[in-house]
Amino acid sequence: MDAVLDNVDLYLKGFGYTIFLFLVSAAISLVLGTLLAAARVGPVAVLRTFASAYVALVRNTPLVIIFLFFQLGAGKIFDWLRFGWVDIHIGPFDFTSFFTAAVAALSLYSSAFVCESIRAGVNSVGLGQAEAARAIGLPFSGVMSQVVLPQAFRASVPPLASTFIALLKNTSVAGVFGVLDAAARMKGFTNDHADQRWGIFIAFALGYMFLVAIVSAIASVLERRWRVV
């Protein structure tokens, strides 16, 4: 544990990268997952087929394979997917191609699970409400945005919380691909202080547990506030 206490700045910086990875990926996956869910329940057959195929493909592909694709293969297909154009610096944090590739992999992977969570919420909304909205002249986009999705999000809070908790833990994979997040820092600490491995593991496990507890607490607050009575 002394290794962590003597290098608290590196410990906190590692979890800083983890938090940034989580927040950016969660926001992107929520938007993309919502669009996929709308496509899956929409009237356009081509979009339904595409969304279903995307979800089936991504959900059955290991996250490491998606990381490898963005790190090794995507740039050979489209040069801009090398993410060399990304070079952002905020205080002590550097957001470069490695970070961007990790965000892309995590977002695309998690969006499939977000889609299924929201689709389950959509299915919980009474069909009569959507039909009534169509009867008064609302187009499909209006029905989804004004009637169905607001209620679907309420019902989707518990599964979405589980999805985002999984996303938070999945950020640890980024450490293998050049992002100096908490998992990468833990590996560095254990390599430099092999005699303190147990203390290092406990310190980083507590850090992840603290972040998961925050996500769970936010989800609980939203679930109580949005509960239909």
Image (cartoon, helix red, strand yellow):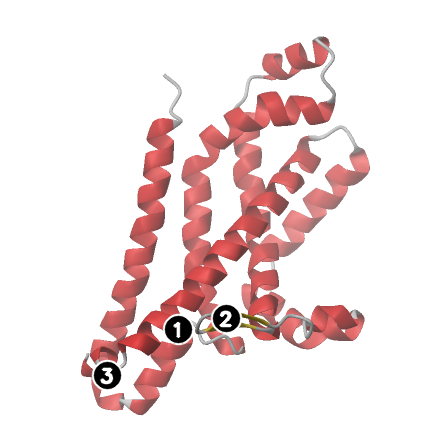
Q: Earlier in the sequence, mark 2 or mark 3?
A: 3
Q: In front of the other: label 2 or label 3? A: 3
Number of residues whose C-alpha sits closer than 10 Å to that of mark 2, classed few (under 14), some (14–19) or many (20 or more): many
Q: Earlier in the sequence, mark 1 or mark 2?
A: 2
What secondary structure is found at the residue carrying circle 3? helix
Number of residues whose C-alpha sits closer than 10 Å to that of mark 1, classed few (under 14), some (14–19) or many (20 or more): many
Label 2 to label 3: alpha-carbon separation: 23 Å
Mark 1, residue position:
183
Mark 2, residue position:
174
Q: What's the amino acid at mark 1?
A: Ala
Report if residue 216 is visible in the image.
Answer: yes
In the picture, measured across the screen, residue 10 lies left or right of residue 152, that is: left
Q: Residue at x 79, y 32 (%)?
A: 44
- Residue 3 shows which numbered tag? 3
In the picture, measured across the screen, residue 189 lies left or right of residue 119, that is: left
**Relative to 173, is 32 above or below?**
above
Q: Earlier in the sequence, mark 1 or mark 3?
A: 3
**Relative to 78, is 36 above or below?**
above
**Relative to 173, is 122 above or below?**
above
Between 11 and 73, the one lying in front of the other is 11
Q: What's the amino acid at mark 2?
A: Ala
Q: What's the amino acid at mark 3?
A: Ala
Label 1 to label 2: alpha-carbon separation: 8 Å
Q: Residue 122, how many percent across, how many down?
A: 57, 28
Labels 2 & 3 near each other (Cβ < 8 A): no
**Farthest residue, direction front:** 91
